[in-house]
Amino acid sequence: MALYRLIYVSQAVSGLEYPDLVEILDKSERNNRKVGITGMLGFGDSMFLQVLEGSRRVVSQTYNRILLDKRHVNAELIDFSEIECRDFGVWSMKVVQLGNQVEVRDLVLKYSSSDTFSPIAMTGKQSLHFLRELTELYQRGAMSNN
Ligand code: FAD
């Protein structure tokens, strides 16, 4: 079956706190595992950047459900493409919270005009490279677990 990747950006509503992220992660891991979705959710400076991978049908269904969630607003689709293989296959979902670590700020700056995390300004390619490198940073242990 063809595989698809969807990347979008959205803005967290004010008052969203760490327990909300934990709840989103728990629910996402459980739901995504059932339908074969893998991906990653970056969160920083009140912005979400998420990648979802899976069949076209389940990626579309999941994205449509996510859009209804009142914990974020102003979602914008950055990329929806057919892919050969998964880049984030190790995780049914992983929330990575972007902190002020030098490595993270350097990575943000590499793909942005400043070191403020503003994924809305990224192209599809930039956001994908950013998420891939963020995954590597996380797996190397350069960031704390969330
Ligand atoms: P339930 O958990 O029973 O939820 C029913 C409804 O209540 C949904 O409309 C839900 O949006 C809403 N809801 C639930 N809890 C809260 C809350 N604390 N505050 C406000 N509204 C709430 N889900 C996935 O399955 N996979 C993902 O990858 C994924 N990524 C997400 C990324 C972001 C940035 C956000 C904000 C949410 C994400 N979610 C994801 C959660 C998704 O939006 C739905 O909440 C979830 O999929 C609904 O699961 P459910 O059908 O079991 O319904």
Image (cartoon, helix red, strand yellow):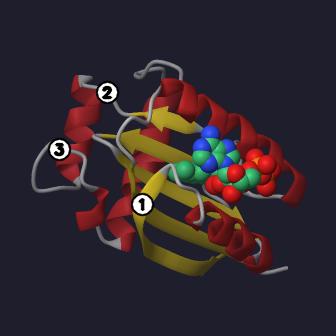
Label 1 vs 3, first from the N-terminus = 1
Disc 2 to disc 3, C-alpha distance: 11 Å
Which residue is depicted at the point 30% across and 58% down? 119
Residue labelled with disc 2:
99
Mark with earlier residue (2, 3): 2
Tell me: is circle 3 under 8 Å from ligand 1: no
Cβ of mark 1 under 8 A from ligand 1: no
Identify the image quadrant of residue 10: bottom left
Q: Nearer the viewer, residue 141 or 115?
A: 115
Report helix, strand or loop for mark 2: loop
Q: Residue tagged by mark 3?
A: 116
Mark whose residue sits in front, 1 or 3? 1
Q: CA distance from mark 1 to mark 2?
A: 22 Å
Q: Is residue 136 left or right of residue 89?
A: left
> At x 53% / y 54%, what residue is drawn?
70
| Label 2: how many Cα within 10 Å (few below 14, some 14–19, many 20+) | some
Q: In 3D space, how far apart are the residues under numbered discs 1 and 3 (Cα atoms)?
A: 19 Å
Residue 66, percent across and down? 61, 61
Residue toward you, 69 or 91? 69
In the figure, is residue 13 to the left or right of 21? left
- Specify whether residue 60 is in view: yes
- The reply to whether callout 1 and callout 3 are in contact (CB within 8 Å) is no
Q: Which mark is residue 143?
A: none
Given the image, on which type of amino acid does mark 3 rest?
Thr
Residue 59, position in %: x, y? 70, 70
